[in-house]
Amino acid sequence: MNRVRLVLASALAIATVFGGSVVANADPDAVAQARKDLDRIHQESSAIDQDIIEAHDRAAQNEAKLKNLTSDVTAQVAKVEKLSAQLGHVGAVQMRGDSISLTAQLLTSSDADNFLSGLGAMQVEADRSTAGIQQLQVDQAKLTTLREDVDATQKQLDKDAAAKVELGKQYDAKEAEAQAVYDRLSEEERQRLAAIEAERVRREAAAQAEAEARAAEERASRDTATSPRVETPSSTSPSPSAPASSKAPKPEKQEEEPPASSGGSGRAQDVVDAALSKVGSRYVWGTSGPSTFDCSGLTSWAYRQVGISLTRSSRGQFSSAGYKVSKSDLRPGDLVFYYSPVSHVGLYIGNGKIVDAANPRSGVRVTSLNSMPFSGARRVIG
């Protein structure tokens, strides 16, 4: 998909040089249909991409879980074997004692106290044996549960491995479908498509800049209105000896914004700088740095650089990271999300642009905020 967009950008450059006459023969219906098809395919491939990311994330979690479970099983096996050996010894002693008739012991014993003492000792051994057997049963049940958990975890790992392969095939098929759409267009139609896309991005970038400027003015106006006023003395002010006037009423409490994180916009800019330092890095599914990334891997890695942990998937970040902000109020460092349902995330860097890990062909890039259908934004810092 990104390869198609790069070719469209090249076509736009040619159209700019030769003017509007180059695209005069373009079929408007063919161009419109191509735009519609490419937008649909891009959204579908983005959803598949997110499914791959989540399958990778589940696999990583289950690999760690399986490692811990395997260690627990080994320890539990050793515990059961040790207790079994101990019970075997106690049982043997008890069986030897039980083989002698208590009546015979009483008849042959010259001292009733010695007999009763021996009988008490045998009862203690019997009680210890019973408690040990019960503990062995508990430990064996725990071992069985651990082994069942290992089997279930391994099955989920195998399932996710198969899913990653299948989803990868689906993703490649979408890329091929997008290329086929582009190949059906004439050269003039390709240039016309590129010109339409560039004009759309230009208009939306201008509208975004205007909306952000308006939001900044409104924030400045609110800050001025709520800041404390310092009154200067006047001839009508009461003298120091005059009675103090009653206290002025407190201004109405304004609706509070969510609390700012420590460091404020400085930390947010650090997040942006971290992400921008990775522009040109490769896109690899299921990775979150330091040299390769997927879309949510880039955003989570950038925030880790300032000590903030985000959930791993773009869907999870959309539902849980920070708090919601409007598109007109975007600031550098905000998470920006695309498509419905959400299947892609980037990082707003200001001036109507984002940095994101797009796909395996383009890697980490800087692109327009409106290069994909915007679905929402969340602020983590500030």
Image (tube, grey):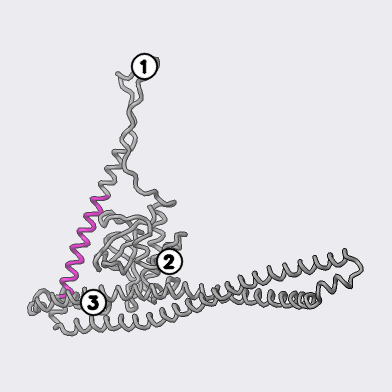
Q: Earlier in the sequence, mark 1 or mark 3?
A: 3
Depth check, front residue: 92 or 330: 92
**Quarter residue 81 falls in:** bottom right
Residue type at tag 1 = Ser
Q: Which residue is mark 3?
A: 41
Depth check, front residue: 82 or 5: 82
Q: Position of residue 262 (x, y in %)?
A: 44, 51
Q: Residue at x 29, y 63 (%)?
A: 353
Secondary element at tag 1 = loop
Asked if residue 200 is among those painted magenta in the image, a careful observer would answer: yes
Residue type at tag 2 = Trp
Depth check, front residue: 138 or 200: 138
Residue 301 image label: 2
Is the C-beta separation of discs 1 and 3 under 8 Å? no
Q: Which residue is mark 1?
A: 239
In the rendered view, would you say 301 is above or below 282? above
Q: CA distance from mark 3 to mark 2?
A: 28 Å
Overall secondary structure of the magenta stretch? helix
Q: Position of residue 226 (x, y in %)?
A: 31, 38
Secondary element at tag 2 = helix
- The part of the chain drawn in magenta is 193-215
In the rendered view, would you say 186 is above or below 197? below
